[in-house]
Image (cartoon, grey):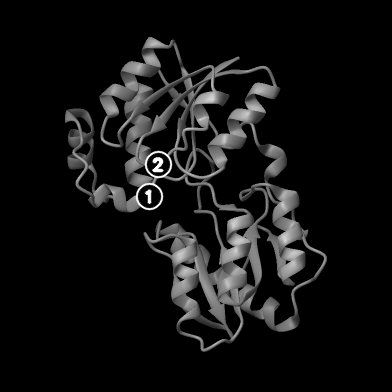
């Protein structure tokens, strides 16, 4: 089958393209110039490049390629909304119509525009279901009793914030919320948290927003997450099972084992 893929940054779009090709799917990639890796060019059947503000150009490319189903893979930094990039007339009109400029509102608005052009936004994890975190302890080391308490507390905070589309992650120390992720991303949030706890251990809790779909903004962890956790003294992580992608799983879990980090997949919405 033939699909379109809108590529942001990170490994997510690369893995999606590799898997799609191995399954025999033809995928036309549209890379975000400010975000995507040039590596996508060698993995896609064809590749086009656009800037973040070029919604009309995106539609023109997809329709020209005969694409009726497209997935979004990879992050586009939310702060780009407030950058100097100029939106085209179609995106300007969309932005002006939004009551809020959060991820839900913006990408949900883009999805409606695409749908109006006969292009359906499909599940971001369409090609990567095996990479979704399972339920239970995913590493050799189980979380300690203190880490379990941090996870339980962090879940209440993270899921409440996710419901309002305010980041995906929180950093917890001794059952206190030290830092909340906003537009800066998980890595920067962890570094900020580490600067506040004077060497005490942190627990990272990542939550998926309370949506019934996985069309966009899917939580992701990977080798870099583990490296930053190690740097920041974070000893445990909890992610929503079935709704969080673990990229480069073997390497991620091997790095976690080496660092003594525990990773747990929890029921989405758990309290």
Residue 56 lies left or right of residue 77; in this view the side is: left
From mark 2 to mark 1, how far is it between C-alphas? 8 Å
Instruction: Give the residue at x 47% y 77%.
Output: 193
Circle 1 — which element?
loop
Q: Residue 235: percent from the left, percent from the top? A: 66, 75
State the residue lying farthest toward the right.
Answer: 140
* Residue toward you, 249 or 206: 249
Residue 148 figure quarter: bottom right
Residue of label 2: 35
Residue of label 1: 77
Q: Residue 172: percent from the left, percent from the top? A: 55, 77
Cβ atoms under marks 2 and 1 closer than 8 Å:
yes
Residue 42 lies left or right of residue 180; in this view the side is: right
Q: Residue 124: percent from the left, percent from the top? A: 54, 36
Quarter of the picture holding the N terminus = top right
Residue 98 figure quarter: top left
State the residue lying farthest toward the bottom.
Answer: 198
Circle 2 — which element?
loop
Q: Earlier in the sequence, mark 2 or mark 1?
A: 2
């Amino acid at each position: 089958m033939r699909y379109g893929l809108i590529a942001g940054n990170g490994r997510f779009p690369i893995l999606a393209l590799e898997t799609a090709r191995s399954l025999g799917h033809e995928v036309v990639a549209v890379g975000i110039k400010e975000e995507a890796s040039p590596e996508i060019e060698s993995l896609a059947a064809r590749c086009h490049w656009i800037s973040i503000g070029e919604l009309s150009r995106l539609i023109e490319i997809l329709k020209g390629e005969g694409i009726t189903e497209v997935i979004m893979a990879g992050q586009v930094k939310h702060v780009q909304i407030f950058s100097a990039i100029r939106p085209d007339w179609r995106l300007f009109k969309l932005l002006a119509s939004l009551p809020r400029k959060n991820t839900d509102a913006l990408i949900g608005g883009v999805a409606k525009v695409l749908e109006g052009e006969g292009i359906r936004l499909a599940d971001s994890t369409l090609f990567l279901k095996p990479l979704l975190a399972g339920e239970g302890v995913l590493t050799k080391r189980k979380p300690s009793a203190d880490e379990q308490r941090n996870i339980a507390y962090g879940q209440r905070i993270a899921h409440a914030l996710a419901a309002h589309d305010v980041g995906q992650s929180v950093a917890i120390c001794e059952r206190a919320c030290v830092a909340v992720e906003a537009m800066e991303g998980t890595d920067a949030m962890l570094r900020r948290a580490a600067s506040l706890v004077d060497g005490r251990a942190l627990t990272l809790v990542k939550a998926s927003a309370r949506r019934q779909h996985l069309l966009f903004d899917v939580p992701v962890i990977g080798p870099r997450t583990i490296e930053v956790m190690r740097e920041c003294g974070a000893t445990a992580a909890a992610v929503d099972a079935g709704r969080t992608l673990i990229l480069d799983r073997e390497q991620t879990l091997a790095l976690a084992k080496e660092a003594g980090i525990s990773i747990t997949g929890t029921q989405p919405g758990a309290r």
